[in-house]
Image: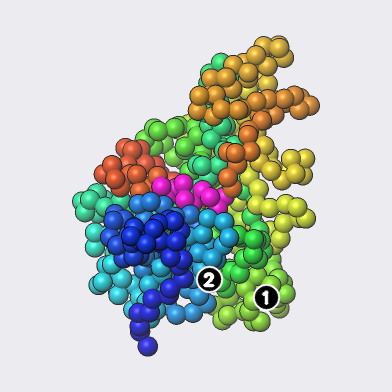
Amino acid sequence: MNHINPVLIFLSFAILMGCSSAEKKTVEEASSKAPYQIMTLDPGHFHAALIQKIALEDLDPTVYVFAPDGPDVQSHLQRIEGFNTRAENPTSWVEEVYTGPDFFEKMIQDKPGNIMVVSGNNAKKTEYINKAVAEGINVLADKPMVINSENFELLKETFELAQRNNVMLYDVMTERHEITIMIQRALSQIPELFGALEQGSVEDPAITKESVHHFFKYVSGNPLKRPAWFFDVTQQGEGLVDIMVHLVDMIQWECYPEQIIDYEMDVAILNAKSWATELTPSMFKRVTHLEDYPEYLNKDIIKDSVLSVHSNGEINYTLKGTHAKTSVIWNYEAPEGAKDTHYSIMRGTKANLIISQGEKEEYKATLYAEKRGDESDAAFLANVNKALSDLQATYPGLGMEQDEDMIRIIIPEEYKVGHEAHFAQVTEKYLNYLKEGKMPDWEVPNMISKYYTTTKAYEMSR
């Protein structure tokens, strides 16, 4: 039966603010002053909850959830309740929940908020985004917004529609807020240290990004339970169109910062491939808490009971003539002490800038500068020191130390806020764009180019 039931999982606003009885305000009064109200659509992925891990001043504390009844929405509400009841900096969200098979139509009909957050099953995500934008609703979408070439065309139309309807469509690119990536980008813009970005080749790309992820991991201190559909590439998307979105975005953002990229002129896919990670029934059960595979996964069963998931991929392409390579690898579980990792190298004519996150670094992202060319070690050290000095105004506390043949960039711990905190940073940036009434001119064409790159590579891999 379709119903609306408020889930009251919040602490008193007045108590949190330490107000006197005369100054106490109800949640409704506080709510009326917040300019942006979230409508969360079918939150099947934990990223939907992370948007709400930290309360932001411009976000209304009442959030409207529209979803089919089932474990996905219940897991989402449990995460929100965890944020509300934690000992340190608890939030005070009020979740108004509608469950029913017509959840999307109900959201469009009632339209109780002005921002749709969508993070979940990707099979219908592009269609949902398009229809929400058509109704004049702003959209903050978890990646990927599209998982195949057919829907890429619909996404392009949706961006045009968003402009006509004066709404903003934006995707959640958390890695732009990861400090080693930010410093790598900043140092690559200092010619005295980096020189110029190499053109590279297929065998030796100018920039390489590799991301390693794990099906079983911990989120907010708890083992992550994944929905079964996450392992169906027709619903989640292959690795080439999922995590790969982040890597392609970072390459655009770092190599050509704040420049418009035209996918028809600037992007050329050279080759692409995908391969599977195999999961045993016990692995699948541990991650999903399900005893058996659902019927839609039967097509991916090999060797009688092993699930074959095409979650891995690699793309070789050129961006404005620069050779780039991206790789995504999914393993079942990280080694002891490890976690999801990122490797990156930008090759300049005077230096390489390398992010490594392996055993040597205790699985913590670490940035190195490596000398190229024939300048002396002393001159290279002086260039690194000068570059870091130039960045002190923006990033106080940066330092360096010799690490074998490379210079390790020392980044203060205060900048290392962690992946989960990046969701609030992205959301805050998006809200600022809404308040300003526009995004930078390069954002929309670069989002389109990014999704062209991933969907075209997927098409080529087939």
Q: Residue at x 55, y 42 (%)?
A: 178
Report which residue position mark 1 lands on. 285
Q: Is residue 286 visible?
A: yes
Q: Quadrant of residue 136?
A: bottom left
The residue at 50%/24% (across/down) is: 393
Q: Residue at x 68, y 53 (%)?
A: 339
At numbered mark 2, what does the secondary structure look like: helix, strand or loop?
helix
Q: Position of residue 87 (x, y in %)?
A: 58, 60
Q: Is residue 96 magenta?
A: no
> Horizontal and vertical percent for residue 30?
32, 59
- Residue 280 image point, x, y percent: 72, 72
User: What residue appears at the point 41 percent right and 47 percent down from the top-left corner?
Assistant: 428
Give the magenta-colored segment's residue range.
Answer: 419-428
User: Which three-letter amino acid code belongs to the residue tagged 2?
Assistant: Gln
Mark 1 lies on a secondary structure that is helix
Classify residue 256 as left or right of residue 439.
right
Q: Split into 4 quadrants, where in the image is the N terminus?
A: bottom left
Report the residue marked by disc 2. Answer: 78
Q: Residue 140 sits in which quadrant?
A: bottom left
Is residue 191 depicted above or below 244 in this figure? above
